[in-house]
Image (cartoon, coloured by chain):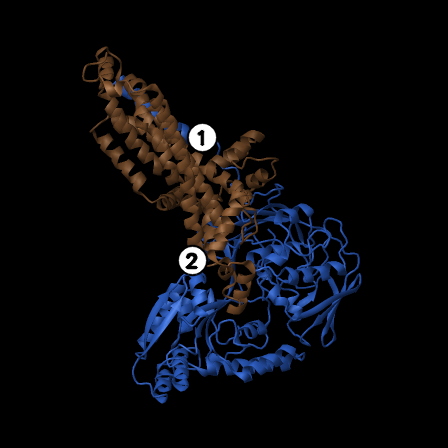
Amino acid sequence: MATLIDAPPPTVAAPKSKSAGGGLGRYILIRFLLIFPTIFILVTLVFFLMRITGDPITAAQGGRLPQEQIDALVHQAGYDRNLFIQYIEYLGNIATGNFGRTISDGRPVVEMLIKFGAATLELSINAVVVALLVGIPLGMFAAHKRDKVSDAFLRMFAILCYATPVFFAGLLLKLTFSVGLGWFPVAGRASTTTELAMGRLAAPTGIYWLDALRSGDLSAFGDIVHHAVLPAVALGLLTAGVFLRLVRTNVIGTLGKDYVEAGRSRGVSEYRLVTKHAYKPALIPIITVMGLQIALLLGGAVLTETTFEWKGLGYQLAQYLTARDFVAVQGIVMLLAVIVAVTNFVVDIAAALIDPRVRY
Amino acid sequence: MTKSTKALRSAIALAGVSALALTACTGPTGGGGGSTASGNASSVIAYGTTDKVTALDPAGSYDNGSFMVMNQIYSFLLNSKPGGAEPVPDLAESASFTTPTEFTVKLKSDLKWANGHVLDSKDVKFSFDRQVKIADPNGPASLLTNIESIAAPDASTVVFTLKKANDQTFAQILTSPAGPIVDDEVFPADKLLSDEEIVKANAFHGQYVIDSFNKNTLVSLKAWPDYNGALGKPANAGATIKYYTDQTNMKLEVKGGQIDVANRSLSATDIDDLKKDSNVKVHVGPGGEMRYIVFNFDTMPFGAKTPEADPKKALAVRQATANLIDRQAISEQVYKGTYLPMWSNVPSGFAGANVSFKEAYGDGSGKPSLDKAKKVMADAGITSPVNIKLQYNPDHYGKSSGDEYAMVKDQLEKSGLFTVDLQSTEWVTYNSASKKDSYPVFQLGWFPDFSDADNYLTPFFVGGGFMNNHYSNAEVETLIAKQLVTGDKSEREKAIQEVQDLLAKDISTLPLLQGAQVAVSGTNVKGVDSTLDASFKFRLGTVSK
């Protein structure tokens, strides 16, 4: 029952239906249009920063050839032309869908993005699964044990999770569970046998566990999961800490609501109150946070992939940066920018649909 | 404990257990462990490296990672047999100078590619012509500058006409990254062919063909039974090449038996650690890698373009430095013996190499000499400590460069003759700045293009050299030109030694260390030592288990 205090002021309570609908439409349109300048700014920054810090020919041949020969090769490749002209040319190529070939190893950029993007997507999915499996149950438990020792311990654990640099967590996990205990492989996405088997599949998705399941090879699936555990945990814990604290806070908030109290007074068990009544509303903000965590996950993937020899976009980005491979770096950064921008757009829309106050 | 609490705990436990069970039920499926594509673990070699493949097309790459794979899948006119670096016929039946400017090669008969195409002189001419025509920035076309033209008068004869007569390095160049022969029916004449298309076309003629190619991740090779070149039949049925980013991962996997051989590059500390591990064997072979200090003759202390320019004093600074450096200490303390002291501009092991710096500087036995350094400085009239701005690079010549140059600084400063400002710069900037006179004294390194002493002389000291350090000595250039065209071996070696003696007097560069080739294998692996030779080519065909 709505009380007098809960009732909104008449001007807000009765907005013109046209303006309300227009508000959502306008909100979606603005959020959508913002994707383009975001990507444009990032791509522009990367274009100029990469060129300021050197060229791929000097990076590759610098130690061997006289400066005149290097200059000639740089000239031949067109890297000494006016930067602005190169930039316009680059934008033109992007507009026509021509992303070119990587300079340092001659791969078509689109193929490279698809191949390594699949590996990064696999790692990200694995990490999100870990984050959800760890963050949500522990968050619920911490809320249930509010201000007890176990709650304090879990809060500290959450802080440790997101405060520990991902490469350090990865290294620690590797040293403990691979080198020390020998439970998991040191590195890679799969054993040699499985990697070769995956390479021979017709029309693979590039997500190994999915490909293994599609081909019905359970042995390969097991091998892939076995290899995926440590990288997924290293990256997943980063987000799990955020989820844990968020779920805890929200569950505590909903546990104090009138309807929960009402349920409690009617004799509903504490377990049922937490898992059925308080849990679901507490999960709504997770959707928003998950979107925001995508950028964090992709950033963490660069380090995780390098630590665990996970040949994905992050790993490749590090390689191409060292080689000053303009074309490859631009391609990868653009894809990452698109992923982050689109994800945030989807999250914004989802949040607006769930909570109408967002668009005002 | 209430019922609800128990239930909640059970739910959480279930989530955790599910996650563990998901992995536990999978178990290790071989995890590598020598497991192979064919399932015959005893005959397929698992090789690991941190090198990278730039391209399988020989015209598009000039790096260790690409060349290693090329050595397994392509043939050369001349190649070196395991155990040495002497060029011997591979695709060729014979090869020699028929006139001072003509190098004639006769091919073996009935050669074919793995795809069934005919391999004849047209392929050979095509291979070199396209290298020069494409001149890819990542390619080795710069090695072929002495070729004037190539003719293929008949199916089994190739005649190289050279610009400079009697080029004694030409046979070696045919074994170098510029030398792999490609299929003219598959490769385009004027552009690079992608790796995928090469693999798809099965355009190979070597000990192996590529069975599966996942670039810079995993390559699977299968022995090719029709190869009958210099390398002979491989000692295994195939091999996999696994690529690592992190040398520590490679070290752990060779220790754990997931790979049979780890080669290029493990750190000195890792190698030292592995030497103590009874599960693996460390193999050491001669190396051509050189680490050295360059003096810029214009900007070094008392250099030609400094306010206090004085060639005599500048020479004294270089000589005092040479007297003070303790190479043995750097070799042992920083590189744990994986780099050895280098006593001349030509590394030991190459025909004509001597120990000119060892004889001329220090105590004559390789130890530093403070007295000699002091005398050189005093004789030149230098009384107060000289400040040296010493630059090194931390990301191109290995992570230990920092330790190496910290020791150099320490050794120089302990004498009281020098103060050293040690600075480091990231590679791309470093390389460019070092050639533009920004660094008075700086670190460089070198890995040979082919196994010949000339590769340590001509690129450095002829026509100003690639270092652009403003060193010039007409006598040195004359001797280098002489050795390049002298067919008589002993005469050539004599000229090479004379060059080294002159270079030791002038000290344009100060050779510090020479690298060894180091590979690590499981104790059950054989044949690694025989391929760690002066050709610097790792041939998987020698390895078995």
Compared to residue B534, the image places residue B199 above or below, namely: above
Q: Position of residue B362 (x, y in %)?
A: 41, 80
Classify residue B416 as left or right of residue B211. Answer: left
Q: Position of residue B48 (x, y in %)?
A: 53, 51
Residue with the mark numbered 2: A52
- From mark 1 to mark 2, how far is it between C-alphas? 48 Å
In the image, taking residue B204 as reference, residue B139 lies left or right, namely left
Where, by quadrant of the figure, is residue B494 drawn?
bottom right
Image location (x, y in percent) of residue A77:
55, 58
Q: Residue type at mark 2?
A: Ile
Residue closer to the observer: A205 or A274 = A205
Locate residue B285: give its quadrant: bottom right
| Disc 2 residue crowd, few under 14, some 14–19, many 20+, Cα 10 Å | few
Which chain is disc 1 placed on?
Answer: B
Query: Considering only vertical position in the picture, is A110 above or below B16?
Result: below
- Circle 2 chain: A
Q: Which residue is mark 1?
A: B22
Of all chains in the rendering, the one displayed in blue is B
Residue B369 horizontal/vertical position (percent): 38, 81
Answer with the quarter of the image where residue B350 lies.
Answer: bottom right
* Above or below, comparing residue A8 to residue B242 in the picture: above
Callouts 1 and 2 in the same chain? no
Q: Colour of chain A?
A: brown
The residue carrying pointer 1 sits among few (fewer than 14), some (14 to 19) or many (20 or more) residues within 10 Å by Cα, namely: some
- Answer whether residue B258 is visible to the viewer in this image: no
Kindly state the secondary structure of the residue where label 1 is placed.
helix
Mark 1 or mark 2, whichever is nearer to me: 2
Residue furthest to the top in view is: A266
Q: Helix, strand or loop at disc 2?
A: helix
Looking at the rendered structure, the kind of residue marked 1 is: Leu
| Circle number at residue B67 | none
